[in-house]
């Protein structure tokens, strides 16, 4: 089994678990922080979550790119499908979620918060599907 594939699988499954916690627990709780504490809460959220998310996302994109460029004996179609989903996750992150966090960093906005929770389903679903594709590849094509 390729170490690149294992690192990619780890990063994807990790991010899928993390995004479900953020989607179901963390983001919905934001509206209960209260306006007096929200700016500090949002600033601390974005500062601390970055230390967890950024290295794993960078590992995921680097290993995903390496796999589609050098698949070895792994079928390329599922790898390209999974990589396309990863590119959509990055697009969603920087086109939708980051601007909403930027807006929320100025003041609590119920509409922006609702949009953050709703649009984050894009990433939640895509990371879940990516995990499924990679776990299927692990079970079907790669012997341990």
Image (spheres, grey):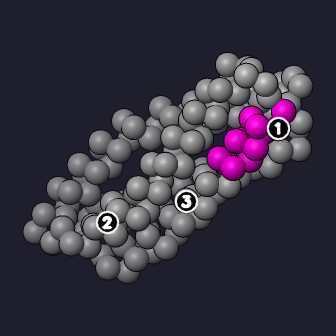
108 in relation to 55, above or below: below
Please tell me how many numbered marks the rendered image carries. 3
Q: Of the residues under marks 2 and 3, which one precedes in the sequence?
A: 2
Estimate the x, y position of residue 132 in percent, counting from the top left: 69, 50
Report the residue at 80% width, 49% height from top. 81
Q: Does the CB distance between marks 2 and 1 fall below 8 Å? A: no
In the rendered image, the residue lying farthest to the left is: 36
Place residue 30 in its image quadrant: bottom left
* Magenta extent: 130-141
Q: Which residue is mark 2?
A: 104
Estimate the x, y position of residue 28 in percent, counting from the top left: 34, 69
Q: Which residue is mark 3?
A: 124
Q: On the picture, is 50 further left or further right than 13?
A: left
- Which one is in front in this view, the residue at disc 2 or the one at disc 3? 3
User: Separation of disc 1 and disc 3 at Cα?
Assistant: 24 Å
- Which one is in front in this view, the residue at disc 2 or the one at disc 1? 1
The residue lying toward the viewer, choosing from 112 and 14, is 14
Q: On the picture, is 125 further left or further right than 66?
A: left
Q: Of the residues under marks 1 and 3, which one precedes in the sequence?
A: 3
Q: Residues within 10 Å of mark 1 (few under 14, many from 20)?
A: few
Place residue 141 in its image quadrant: top right
The residue lying toward the viewer, choosing from 109 and 63, is 63
Q: Which residue is mark 1?
A: 140
**For residue 57, which numbered disc appears in the image?**
none
The kind of secondary structure element at disc 1 is: helix
User: Separation of disc 2 and disc 1 at Cα?
Assistant: 44 Å
Q: Residues within 10 Å of mark 2 (few under 14, many from 20)?
A: many
Q: Main secondary structure of the magenta part?
A: helix
Report the residue at 32% width, 79% height from top. 110
Report the residue at 41% width, 56% height from top. 21
- Which one is in front in this view, the residue at disc 1 or the one at disc 3? 1
21 in relation to 131, above or below: below
């Amino acid at each position: 089994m390729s170490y690149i594939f294992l690192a990619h699988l780890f990063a994807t499954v990790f991010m899928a678990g993390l995004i479900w916690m953020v989607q179901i627990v963390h983001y919905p709780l934001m509206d209960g922080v209260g306006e007096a504490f929200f700016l500090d809460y949002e600033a601390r959220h974005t500062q601390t979550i970055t230390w967890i998310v950024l290295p794993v996302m960078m590992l995921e994109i680097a290993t995903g790119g390496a796999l589609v460029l050098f698949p070895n004996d792994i079928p390329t179609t599922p790898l390209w499908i999974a990589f396309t989903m990863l590119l959509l996750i990055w697009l969603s992150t920087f086109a939708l979620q980051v601007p909403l966090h930027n807006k929320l960093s100025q003041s609590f906005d119920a509409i922006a918060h609702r949009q953050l929770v709703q649009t984050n389903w894009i990433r939640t679903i895509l990371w879940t599907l990516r995990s499924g594709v990679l776990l299927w590849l692990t079970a079907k094509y790669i012997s341990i």
